[in-house]
Image (cartoon, rainbow, N blue to C red):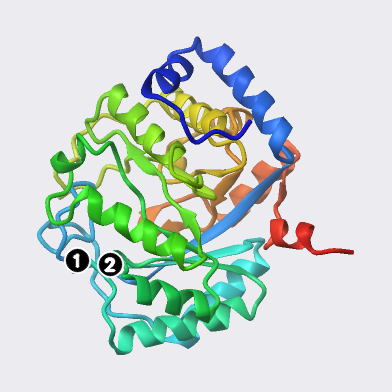
Amino acid sequence: MIRNNWTLDDVKEIYDMPLLELVFRAAAVHREYNDTGEVQVCTLLSIKTGGCPEDCAYCPQAARYHTDVKTHGLMKKEEVLQYAAKAKEAGSTRFCMGAAWREVRDNRDFDHVLEMVKGINAMDMEVCCTLGMLNAEQARKLAAAGLFAYNHNLDTSSEYYGEIISTRTYDDRLQTLDNVRKAGLTVCCGGIIGLGETHDDRMKMLQTLSTMPEHPESVPVNALVRIEGTPLAQQPKVDIWDMVRMIATARILMPKAMVRLSAGRQEMSLAEQALCFMAGANSIFAGEKLLTTPNPSFDEDHAMFAMLGLKPREAFKEAKETVPA
C-alpha cells in the first residue's frame, strides 16, 4: 500500500531491520510495484560549471573552495543538444542539465535553458533540470517548454542541514519543491549520505520524502564523493552496506519511485551495484561524469547490464501505459 503517513518510528523499524531481511522485504516490494528487469538510464551534464555563491560543504563548484574544477559559463544550445543526442544513442532515456546557480534568474541565460529544454524534449527524451531555487512562474515556464522533471535534493535531515549549508534554508528547498509540483512537473528529490550525519538524520530525511503529499517520482541516493578543497574532503568512504540499507528503506517507503543509485557508483564493484539493484534501485546516471565528479563509462554500464540481465527503461513509460489503446 502506498502510504504518506510514515512516522519516524515506522521508518526506524524498517531501517533497523537485519540487513538480509531488509533487502528481502525491499526486493519483494520492488517486484510488486515495478519491472525489476529494467533500469532507468539518465545522463547528467553540467551546462554551467563553478563559481557558485553557495557554501554547500560537499560541492567542488562553490566559489569559496579551492578545487580543480574549472569554471565555465552557460554552454551553447547546439553543444548541449549534441551531447544529448550522443547520450540517447548510448542508451539514455532521461537527460539532466545542471547549472551551478543559487537560484534561477529571469534573464537571457534562463531563456537559453528554456530553448535547450524544448530541443531535448523534441528528441523524445525525458528532460530534467537542476538549476537551484525556482519561483512558481519559473517552474511554469519550464513546464511549458517541455521539462519533465526538476531535481532539488534535500541533502540531509532538517536538523543537520545547517551543518552543511548556510546560504539557504531547508524551507527554501521545500518551497522550490512545492513550486515544481504545482507547475505539474515530476519531482526528483533525494539526498547524500556520508556528510557526517547520524543514522537518525538519514531516517528523518527519508521520512520527510515519504510523507510528502505525493512521493517524489525519482529519489537519488548519493554517496559523498570526497573532493580535495571542500570541507568534507576527509570524510570516510561511505560503506556499501549503508548504501544498500538506504536504498532498501527508500524502496519500502516509496514503492513506485525511481530510486536512483547516484553519486559514488564509481567506487562500487559490479557485485556491490548488483546488491543495490536487488535492494530496489532502478535508476542510474550513465556517462563518465556527474557534473564534475567521475562516473562509470557507458561501455562499463552496458557490460554490467548484460551481466545482470537488465534493460534500459523506455522514456515516458508511465504516460505511454496510461494512453488508451
Label at residue 10: none
Give residue 325's position: percent from left, percent from top: 89, 64
In the rendered image, residue 313, in percent from the top left (x then y), is placed at 70, 53
Which residue lies at the image location 65% right of the left edge and 42% below the top edge? 304
Q: Amino acid at mark 1?
A: Cys
220 or 238, which is in the foreground? 220
- Count of numbered badges drawn on the protein: 2
Residue tagged by mark 2? Answer: 100
Q: For this view, does 239 lie left or right of residue 272?
A: left
Left or right of residue 212: residue 277: right
Extreme residue in the right direction: 325
Q: Residue at x 58, y 20 (%)?
A: 23
Element at label 2 = loop
The residue singled out by tag 1 in the image is: 52
Is residue 59 something one can see in this rendering?
no
Vertical comparison of 149 with 157: above or below = below
